C-alpha cells in the first residue's frame, strides 16, 4: 500500500512541476509578445558612401556624410529661385517647413522681409557646391549625439532680367539637429537649425585658387 502511495505522490509532484513549467513558459511567451509589440516598426540605418573597408552602424546612428548631404540638399532647395525670389523664396520656406526648425523658419522669414525691403527678391538665384570643395570629414563637426555643424562652400549666382547681379562664393556653417517629429513629413529625421556662425564670403580665396590652377594648366 505504501508503495502505491509513494507512486501516486511522485505522479502528483511531477504534474505540479509540469504545471509550473507551463506557467513559466506562458509568462515568457507573453513577455516576448509584449516586447515584439513595442518594437519600432521603422528604423533608420545610415549607410556610409565608401564600404570598401566595411562599416558597423548602430540603429539611429547618423553618418556625417549623410548629415552633410541632407543639409546641402535642403539648403540648395531653399535658395533655388528659378522665377523670382518674391514667390520662390516664400514658397520654399513653406514647402520645406518639415525640414527646418521653427526657430530657423522665423529667421528665414525675417531674411525674406529684409530682402523684400532691399528689392532683392525680383531676382533669380542658384546655389551649388563649389566643385573643388566637396565633402570631407573635417566639414562636419559632431556637436553632440543630437546635433552637427556642417560647413558648405558654395557659389551663389543671382540674375535680374537676364543680367548677372551677383556671383559670389560663400561659406555657410549650418547647424543640423535630429528632428524625429513627423516621419511621414520628414523621413530623414533631421532639420536645419540655423547658422552656427555668420556666413563668410570666399570669393577672393576662390579667385586666387582658380588663377593658380589656370597658371598650372598653362605652364
Image: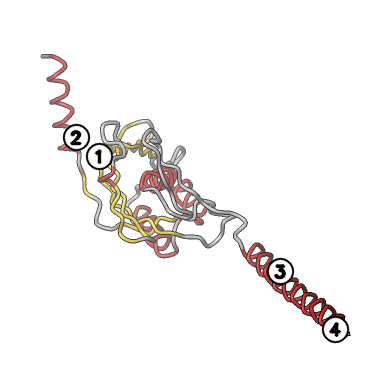
Q: CA distance from mark 2 to mark 1?
A: 7 Å
Would you name the residue on which mark 3 appears? Answer: 25
Q: CA distance from mark 3 to mark 4?
A: 30 Å
Tell me the residue at 24%/55% (across/down): 198
Q: Tag 4's secondary structure?
A: helix
The crowd level at tag 2 (other Cα within 10 Å; few <14, some 14-19, many 20+) is some
The crowd level at tag 4 (other Cα within 10 Å; few <14, some 14-19, many 20+) is few
User: Which of the two labelled residues, at mark 2 and mark 4, occupies the earlier sequence position?
Assistant: 4
In this rendering, the answer to whether 10 lies above or below 197 is below
Would you name the residue on which mark 2 appears? Answer: 206
The crowd level at tag 1 (other Cα within 10 Å; few <14, some 14-19, many 20+) is many
The crowd level at tag 3 (other Cα within 10 Å; few <14, some 14-19, many 20+) is few
Say which mark, if any, is on residue 5: 4
Q: CA distance from mark 3 to mark 1?
A: 67 Å
User: Which of the two labelled residues, at mark 2 and mark 1, occupies the earlier sequence position?
Assistant: 1
Q: CA distance from mark 4 to mark 1?
A: 97 Å
The residue lying toward the viewer, choosing from 10 and 57, is 10
User: Which of the two labelled residues, at mark 3 and mark 4, occupies the earlier sequence position?
Assistant: 4
Tell me the residue at 36%/59% (across/down): 147
Q: Find residue 207 and report its image quarter.
A: top left
Q: Position of residue 32 (x, y in %)?
A: 66, 65
Is the residue under label 2 in contact with that under label 3 (CB below 8 Å)?
Answer: no
Is the residue under label 1 in contact with that under label 2 (CB below 8 Å)?
Answer: yes
Q: Position of residue 40 (x, y in %)?
A: 59, 59
In this rendering, the answer to whether 30 lies above or below 147 is below
* Left or right: 130 in relation to 32: left
In this rendering, the answer to whether 195 lies above or below 2 is above
Would you name the residue on which mark 1 appears? Answer: 169
User: Which of the two labelled residues, at mark 3 and mark 1, occupies the earlier sequence position?
Assistant: 3
Extreme-top residue of the structure: 219
Amino acid at each position: 500500500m505504501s508503495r502505491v502511495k509513494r507512486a501516486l505522490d511522485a505522479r502528483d509532484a511531477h504534474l505540479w512541476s509540469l504545471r509550473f513549467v507551463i506557467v513559466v513558459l506562458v509568462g515568457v511567451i507573453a513577455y516576448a509578445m509584449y516586447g515584439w509589440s513595442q518594437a519600432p516598426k521603422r528604423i533608420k540605418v545610415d549607410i556610409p558612401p565608401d564600404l570598401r573597408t566595411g562599416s558597423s552602424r548602430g540603429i539611429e546612428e547618423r553618418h556625417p556624410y549623410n548629415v552633410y548631404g541632407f543639409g546641402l540638399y535642403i539648403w540648395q532647395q531653399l535658395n533655388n529661385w528659378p522665377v523670382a525670389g518674391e514667390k520662390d523664396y516664400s514658397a520654399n520656406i513653406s514647402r520645406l517647413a518639415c525640414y527646418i526648425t521653427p526657430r530657423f523658419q522665423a529667421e528665414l522669414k525675417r531674411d525674406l522681409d529684409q530682402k523684400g525691403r532691399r528689392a532683392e527678391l525680383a531676382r533669380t538665384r542658384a546655389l551649388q557646391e563649389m566643385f573643388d570643395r566637396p565633402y570631407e570629414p573635417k566639414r562636419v563637426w559632431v556637436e553632440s549625439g543630437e546635433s552637427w555643424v556642417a560647413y558648405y562652400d558654395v557659389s551663389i549666382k543671382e540674375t535680374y532680367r537676364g543680367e548677372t547681379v551677383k556671383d559670389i562664393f560663400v561659406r555657410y556653417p549650418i547647424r543640423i539637429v535630429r528632428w524625429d517629429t513627423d516621419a511621414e513629413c520628414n523621413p530623414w529625421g533631421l532639420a536645419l537649425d540655423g547658422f552656427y556662425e555668420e556666413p563668410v564670403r570666399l570669393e577672393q580665396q576662390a579667385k586666387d585658387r582658380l588663377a593658380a590652377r589656370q597658371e598650372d594648366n598653362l605652364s
